[in-house]
Every structure is written in C-alpha cells, then in structure tokens.
Amino acid sequence: MTAAEHLAWCKEQALEFLDRGECGQAVLLFVAEMDKHPETRLHKFLSPFFNSWLDGFLPRASQIRDHIEGFN
C-alpha cells in the first residue's frame, strides 16, 4: 500500500468513528494507524494534531474532522 493509499484509509477509518460521535477514538485510531506505515508515521502534523487534541484545543468533532481531512 502506498503512503497516499494508507493515509486515505486512515482518514476513512477515523471519520467513521467521528460520524458515530466517538471523537477520542477517531483521534487515537488515526494516530495509531498512521504510525503503522513507514511513510506516514513521521508526518509533520501528526504530533501537533494529537497534542492539540490531548490538550483540549480541539473540543468539537468539526475541528477534529477539519484536521483529519486536512492531512495530505
């Protein structure tokens, strides 16, 4: 699987959790799955995204969605 395919799959899986209202699970799954591919594990926005969520700066599902969908 290419990095682009893996990223698309991670987004899809995380957004399914988000659509069910499981914001925390969406973030955790996205970060964990991104870590499983050698070309996505070091994405420059992954750590800031996770830390922003962890520190409470992304309290709404819409904010989390924007961040996940914004990963390229």
Image (cartoon, grey):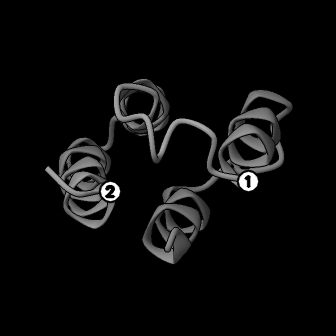
Label 1: which secondary element: loop
Using the image as rendered, state which of residue 72 and residue 49 is in the foreground. Answer: 72
Residue 3, numbered label = 2
Amino acid at the residue labelled 2: Ala
Q: Position of residue 37 (x, y in %)?
A: 35, 35
Give the numbered dot on residue 44. Answer: 1
Q: Quadrant of residue 19?
A: bottom left
Give the residue displayed 49% in from the left and 33% down from the top: 31
44 or 48: nearer the viewer: 44
Residue 58, image x and y in percent?
Answer: 72, 51
Label 2 SS? helix
Among the two numbered marks 1 and 2 on one chain, the one whose residue lies closer to the N terminus? 2
Foreground residue among 14 and 22: 14
Q: Is residue 46 above or below residue 51?
A: below
- Structural crowding at the residue carrying mark 2, measured as other residues with C-alpha within 10 Å and reported as few (<14), some (14–19) or many (≥20): some
Q: Position of residue 52 (x, y in %)?
A: 81, 43
State the image coordinates of residue 54 (x, y, percent, origin top left): 75, 28
Q: Residue at x 83, y 48 (%)?
A: 57
